[in-house]
Image: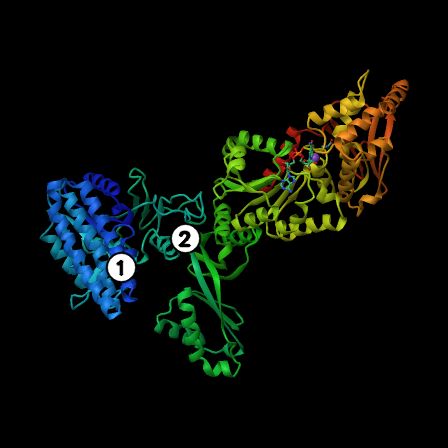
Amino acid sequence: MNILKFGGTSVGSAQSISALMDILKKETGVENPIVVLSAMGGVTNTLLLMAENARSGADYADQLKEIETKHFEVIRALLPAGAQNPVLTKLKIYFNELEDILQSVYTLRELSLQTKDLILSYGERCSNVMVSHIARQYFANSVYVDGAELIKTDGNFGQAKVNTQLTETLIRDFYESNKDKLLFVTGFISSNEDGRVTTLGRGGSDYTAAIWGAALNAEEIQIWTDVDGMLTADPRIVKKAFSLPELSYIEAMELSYFGAKVIYPPTMTPAFLKKIPIVIKNTFNVDFPGTYIKHGAQASSLPIKGISSIDEISILNLSGSGMVGKAGFSGRLFSLLSREQVNVVLITQSSSEHSITFAVKPTDALKALALISKEFELELQARKLEYPEVENGLSILAIVGENMKRTPGISGRLFSALGRNGVNIRAIAQGSSEYNISVILSRADLSKAVNAVHDAFYSDLKKTLNIFCLGTGNIGKTLFQQLQNQMPFLAKNNDLQVKVMGVSNTRKMYLNPDGIDLTTWENVLEEQGDKADLGEFIKQMKNMNLANCVFVDNTASHNPIQFYLDVLQSSISVVTCNKIGNSAEYDQYVAFKEAARKHGVEFYYETNVGAGLPIIRTLKDLMLSGDRIASIEAILSGTISYIFNNFKGDRLFHEVVKEAQDLGYTEPDPRDDLNGKDFMRKMLILARDAGYALEEKDVAIESMLPAACLAANSVADFYQEMEKNAAHFENLKQEAAKNNKVLRYIGKLEDGKVSITLQMVDDSHPFYMLSGSDNIISFITDRYKERPLVVKGPGAGAEVTAAGVFADIINVGKR
Ligand SMILES: NC(=O)C1=CN([C@@H]2O[C@H](COP(=O)(O)OP(=O)(O)OC[C@H]3O[C@@H](n4cnc5c(N)ncnc54)[C@H](O)[C@@H]3O)[C@@H](O)[C@H]2O)C=CC1
Ligand SMILES: N[C@@H](CC=O)C(=O)O
Ligand code: NA
């Protein structure tokens, strides 16, 4: 025989009760199951609220009406008109009783725990009366059972302790004479010796099911809820949390003790003692196998079973010389707290015995403080103890699993995942059972931490990168297109998901914690976006506090640069194609790198030089492996390269410049290319990466433009001036052609000096043969000195640049 317990959501509406009936049709056969029901979803909370309202003299009539309507609507929806009256009458009697009790509370302005239990009991009574009547349409032998009469407890109202022996006898006797019926038993409620209603603690309906299961040696106890069993983490926090097929009782206990509200922890004990499996199933996804909690649960390959957490916790720290070597000190402390019903959630003690830190619920913190101040008054006065302080705003995160016992490196993985994501740990505890490692951290970091730890332990599963992008121009737009096309491949082959969580241009910004759909981002940004505000964008990004976060700068603007440090210091990686940051003051360039290193995140800027060509990476690898750069010679302006490769025959110079601009090779302002500034930035970044602390003024630039072009104060002006100075460019071209040479704008780093010069080279020069927007770079190093290491290829354009940014993002994910 099975026990089937249905929680609040499973009896919460006409629809879910119909689903419940379908489940019962499958489960009834030779032997009837025993059905245990909670109150309708939300009703217990409303009852509590009404009780509190009555006590404080506030109105509760509307809430009473609300509960009544909730039940009556279900009855009208699920029972034919002729069958409604008896059950409506029965419920009406309950509601009248409830009203009388609330009236007394209201009059006396007094609410004892005993009265509270009585008020709460109506939730389960009403739902069971209602559902057992509805069930009669399909199961003629359905009966309502007041479970309070059969579960006997002490008088600890609100959290009563069960008299197991007496209870089991009562249940067995009752069952013997009612075997042929389909029993609907009220969960959660019980009664004391005097027959007063007591309750088994919030979530106690699970416990009722386990008590009945143990008394009757059930085959299994099924807990029907609204999730697919026990998950690896709270799915509201971790989108990728998944359901666990099997758990041991201890694992389930550890997981549910901390946060995972799927099952009420005391439920485990009766089931564990009688070795009865508990199955957690989803009423709304009946075919899903759910989670089995049982003896000899199969060892799984997962290093940990799950991550659970307590949202709000406070800690108290007790320290002082008076504690050192004092036997019985902690005994005194903790028996005091236990005597006064302060539940201690976690304890850590330093090996010097100089301090004890313990965690309690925030509602208990001040009480604990007061108790300690009184108990240790003398020690505090004599300064042998420091006056303890309460620290609030904290959470506990715990990883749980029996496999931890046999696997070294688990805590390393936990702490490095937290460290990499900038999560500061306030205290740590590992039970000697090694089933659980708990850490205390700031509440603001909890969601990020749980996600980071989930990724770290289930890394064979998909890892998510959360990206926030500035710039929706040439490069930004192309990047989104590439991301969208490549997403399925990455998910399939690299277990990586890249989610765009925020986007901004100069006009609008849009952030969405669920991610932004890349098929509609342009419309969404336009229609749902707020007015752009870079500071606000960064603030909201930081507030989301996501794990594996990347800030992507696809602008050509100075404004984002001032935020890089703050972003890196917030443990968010930066990927940028914007060269302004790295080519401004040397100290700033160094500060970015140091911040990234210190905070364990990445600062990637491959596209700062040669767009997607692997130049920065190559140089970095040379340096890391101990090579030394003797000299660099390079063509690094894709725009100028394109111009010289296409400025032929009778073509006009300014027309070719326009063509380069239309092809997306130039900077947003093409003057930055032609005046050598863009090239200068690239050379400066290369020189710095090669180990030289140079500034902009150290780069000698030979201009290829006549003074009037350089002086143009708008892009339109600039084109006009180039047109007016056509003869200057024509002369350059003809002179080169006359000598069988080509024009090349070449950068050089040698002996720590950087120059950029306009040259005419013949076919003996390695830079002679270039086409399109080609860049070329030749490194002479200690190891590559006979023949240089050369990288060559298209060095400008939206596709190759966006691809370089994309690769940088993926490389953050690989770490
Ligand atoms: N075109 C190319 O081949 C290469 C370009 N790059 C770099 O790519 C970057 C972007 O170039 P394009 O896409 O061509 O420029 P673009 O002018 O087409 O787009 C720039 C975008 O940045 C946005 N923006 C500017 N300031 C902003 C701010 N403060 N906050 C938010 N958004 C802001 C603009 O609204 C625009 O959407 C530049 O830094 C460029 O140097 C790097 C390598 C190669
Ligand atoms: N405008 C740049 C693009 C790459 O950085 C160029 O022309 O090289
Ligand atoms: Na590059």
Write down which quadrant ligand 1 falls in.
Answer: top right
Image coordinates of residue 329 in percent, x first then y, are 45, 76
Could you say which is closer to the camera, residue 594 or residue 404?
594
**Above-or-below relation of 495 to 6:** above
The image quarter in which residue 53 lies = bottom left
Crowd rating for badge 1 (residues with CA inside 10 Å; few <14, some 14–19, many 20+): many
Q: Residue furthest left?
A: 177
Residue 133 falls left or right of residue 69: left
Report the disc number at residue 378. Answer: none
With respect to residue 635, does 233 lie above or below? below
Q: Is residue 22 visible?
A: yes
Callout 1 amino acid: Tyr
Under circle 1, the secondary element is loop
Asked if residue 609 lies left or right of residue 420, the reply is right
- Residue behind mark 1: 60
Residue at the image point whose x is 38% and y is 45% from the top = 244
Which of the marked residues, 1 or 2, is nearer the chain's N terminus?
1
Q: Give the x, y percent position of residue 176.
A: 11, 53
Type of amino acid at the residue the image marks with label 2:
Glu
The percent coordinates of residue 144 (x first, y second) are 14, 51
| Residue at the disc numbered 2 | 402
Q: Nearer the viewer, residue 295 or 208?
A: 208
How many residues crowd mark 2 within 10 Å: few (<14), some (14–19), many (20+)? many
